[in-house]
Image: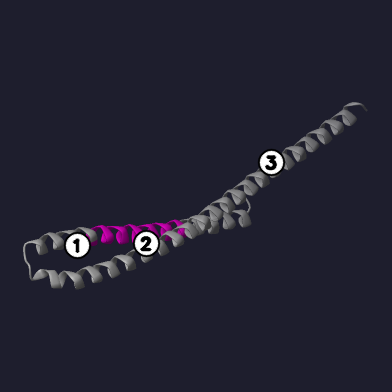
Amino acid sequence: MTKWAASLIRISNHEVETLQKRLAEITERRMAAEMRVTLLDAEAEAEAKNAEGDPSAGWYMIGYREGSKRRRADMLVQIEQCQQEEAGARDALSEAFENLKKYEHVAEQAKILAAKKMNAFEAAQMDELSIRRAAVGGR
């Protein structure tokens, strides 16, 4: 394999690995945000059950529910942003992987071509050797 092909493949591998790490981080952030939404919903439900037994808690529940709705909306926006970022990262990773495979294919073809040239050169040398032997033996 030529130096340029090995370097190109190594750089492309690095790019794929970097994009895989980035995608994993984005997915982790999205999952954490989804978990926070679930916890927020469970917390709101528990707070509502606690407020059922206390008549004075009704006034506090109005503010709590508004705050809970805002936090939930913020989390949903964050999840949406993570999903969009994740889609972009997946596309970039797919493209980088395709490029890596192209480079590997080109390197393999270059290796095959070099082997063919070497075989043709060896065949030409053998032909020349046999012609010389025939010429010397024919005298």
Residue drawn at x 76%, y 40% as measured from the top left: 121
Front-lying residue, 112 or 72: 72
Position of residue 71 in the picture relative to residue 125 (left or right): left
Q: First in sequence: mark 1 or mark 3? A: 1
Kind of residue at disc 3: Ala
Nearer to us of marks 1 and 3 is 1
Q: First in sequence: mark 3 or mark 2? A: 2
Q: What stretch is highlighted in magenta?
A: 18-40
Image x and y of residue 132, in percent:
86, 33
- The residue identified by callout 2 is 79
Kind of residue at disc 1: Ala
Nearer to us of marks 3 and 2 is 2
Q: How far apart are marks 1 and 3 (CA)?
A: 71 Å
Kind of residue at disc 2: Ile
- Compared with residue 139, is residue 53 higher up or lower down, i.e. above or below? below
- The residue identified by callout 1 is 44
